[in-house]
Image (spheres, grey):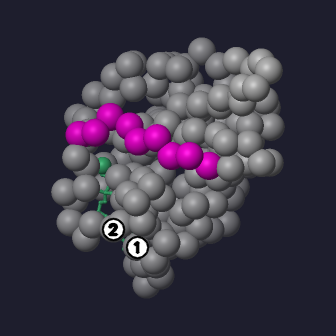
Amino acid sequence: QSGEGQTEDYLFKIVLIGDSAVGKSNLLARFARDEFYSNSKSTIGVEFQTQKMEINGKEVKAQIWDTAGQERFRAVTSAYYRGAVGALLVYDISRRQTFDSIGRWLNELQTHSDMNVITILVGNKSDLKDAREVTTAEGKVLAEAQGLFFIETSALDSSNVTAAFQTVVRELFNILS
Ligand code: GDP
Ligand code: MG
């Protein structure tokens, strides 16, 4: 709502999706708290975290949802997706199987959302250079074919983590403001 003496409020729901252990919780921990957990205890069952960002001089809030590990059982509920306008679809560049799952996650996202969700394909764990199983080019090609943004990140060494979230939020701001 805007009015005299009031500032407009922007709140975007963004969901983290992708196979188990690709680093979703650590991407959020790095982005929101600049923390990293070397074991998988980072999934703490908090539904979402709200992060303030500034885009074009306006305050924007990104409400970022993380799964509580239910993707292990392929049981991410429709409540998780409800109202989402953005998504980070994450795979692990050192495990091809997680890249092969992207199509399934895209289907799930499209099934559960009523609008076109602004999505970035995220190849995480770019620090694991010697263990890489998915090339950067493969990620780019898939993203282009599916109309997604694309970035490679490392929650461990922080590279591109902020950029991944910012790409989605900036696009949402451009479209929805
Ligand atoms: P989630 O199941 O997708 O939420 O994945 P987690 O965030 O729990 O991470 C799974 C495992 O991968 C943990 O042991 C993390 O420490 C590790 N991990 C997450 N991100 C990275 C990364 O960028 N690089 C490396 N080397 N390990 C990571
Ligand atoms: Mg997790």
Q: Secondary structure at mark 2?
A: loop
Which of the 4 image quarters holds residue 80?
top left
Residue at the spot 20% in from the left edge and 66% down from the top edge: 39
Label 2 lies in ligand 1 vicinity (Cβ under 8 Å): yes
Side (left or right) of 166 relative to 127:
right
Residue 104 at least partly seen: yes
Percent position (x, y) of residue 40?
22, 59
Residue 156 tag number: 1
Q: Along the line of sight, which residue is nearer the eye, 48 or 144?
A: 48
Q: Earlier in the sequence, mark 1 or mark 2?
A: 2
Crowd around label 1: few <14 · some 14–19 · many ≥20 (10 Å): many
Label 1 lies in ligand 1 vicinity (Cβ under 8 Å): yes
The residue beneath circle 2 is 36
Q: Is residue 162 above or below residue 70?
A: below
Q: Amino acid at mark 1?
A: Leu
> Which segment is the magenta one?
45-53
